[in-house]
Amino acid sequence: MIKKILIANRGEIACRIIRACNEMSIKAVAVYSDVDVDSPHVLMADQAVNIGSANPSESYLNFDKIINAAKETGADAIHPGYGFLSENGAFAQYVKESDLIFIGPEADTIKSMGDKAESKQMMFEAGVPTIPGSDGELVGNIDSIARDIGYPLMVKAAAGGGGKGMRVVRNEGELDSSIEAAKNEARNSFGNDTLILEKFLDNPRHIEVQILGDKNGNIVHLYERECSIQRRHQKIIEESPSPAITNKFRKKMGEAAVKAAKAANYSNAGTVEFLYQEGEFYFLEMNTRLQVEHGVTEMVCGIDIVKWQIRVAQGESLTFSQKDIKQRGHSIECRIYAEDPSRGFLPTPGFIRKMILPEGPGVRNDVGVSEAQEITSSYDPLLAKLVVWDSDRGSAIQRMDLALSNFVILGLITNQPFLRDIMKNESFQKASFSTNFIDENFKDWDFPALDPQVLALALLSSKASQAQISSSAESYSPWSNNRGWRQGV
């Protein structure tokens, strides 16, 4: 049995995993970089180890430092969370070779599913619907391949994700420049410039299915999540169930996800992502890790996915079958980012002067920051995930809007007002949207005028926190200069 887990991550997901460890009476070890010394995950853990500078390659991406930290603290296992090393097959193999348990799928599964060309071919052979396109690495007469598929096309990096190394090609004249741009971005982001070419679906929905499997071949799905509300190919709002599909179609999509997982010989938690358009769905990719948005599935299914990751990793079998899993009610998640939606979602580093979290029935806060903490530009600007549950979608939207109105972070700009406007949007409320939703509805969005009462609270908060935060570190802060500024709350 696992007695101590090192979490090879930071922020809200590290906090989430530590909470699961606490509930299972498992000791938790945090690792942190120099800039994260006072982060909540460090304070929550039973032990914490400094593993280097803010540069991820010197800390959170460094195999040896993480393994050494696990050995030094007597950890049995390593949980990678999401991002960083979570989908790195070489790291998973290194953990195993170091006589530690990797809490996730097998290294070979991670490697095969991490290669978009290989995974697509595997899914095609398994009978899972795939997007028309090149079945392998983009080589040979590319012009001829493109004409056979038909425009518009998507040039896509075979390795990696997060919207990197992707370009839409509308016509033959854009092909060469798009391939070159995608190749360069893929090389810089993933160290691999292999590309594939697919038919571009111009108005799809992004629907994914959560799967869970044990080491004895038992695999179930925990139904689907609607993830179409995105900026720059990255999700900001997720919900379950998807309002776009019927129960009959939901069953079909879930069965396809289980078929995909079995083809990959999958164990532990994972997600099969599909694009859905005009009554058809196509395999997009498989994420061999815990998803950011796993909370909405937990809310509607009543299954703690993180705990089951740990149980599966220590050899336990699933104690439920597919017929035991039901969706109940409706859940929505909003990702709270330190970013400016009015300036192309640029990150907005700064100090958190005041933070107030919403409370009440059906409200869940997965938070990885605290008051007086500096939010740097070193890492992803995700601050928190706000998740709500209610009996139906309309009620869940109302609950989310109220929760967002009571979610306050002062001191830096966040996307909270933007998320509230989405909740109030008629197309969103009617579930009439695709992955193009933000471009179609919020292209010229700007911050609303600041409420005077909020401004007064901000000014009081600023004065109260002066003793906590060094003025030398906040030359860019609106509190320390007399230039015009806006406060996102």
Image (tube, grey):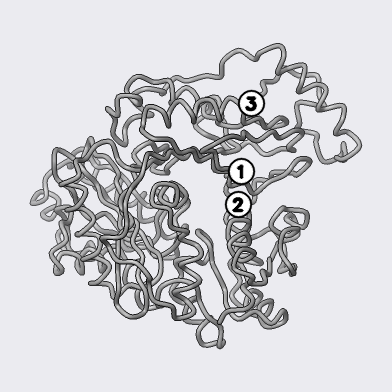
Spot occupied by residue 480 in the image (x, y as percentages of width and height): 83, 27
Residue displayed at 40% across by 60% down: 160
Task: Say if 298 sits above or below 243 in the image.
Answer: below
Labels 1 and 2: the sequence-earlier one? 2
Three-letter amino acid code at the position of disc 1: Leu
Mark 1, Cα crowd under 10 Å, few <14 / some 14-19 / many 20+, is many
**Residue bearing the label numbered 3:** 489
Pick the front one: 317 or 86: 317
Circles 1 and 2, Cβ within 8 Å, touching? The answer is: yes
* Quadrant in which the N terminus is drawn: bottom right
The picture places residue 413, in percent across and down from the top left corner, at 64, 30
Q: Secondary structure at mark 3?
A: loop
Residue behind mark 2: 12
Amino acid bearing label 3: Val
In this orientation, which residue lies closer to the viewer: 361 or 436? Answer: 361
Question: Residue at (52%, 67%) from the top-left corner?
Answer: 85
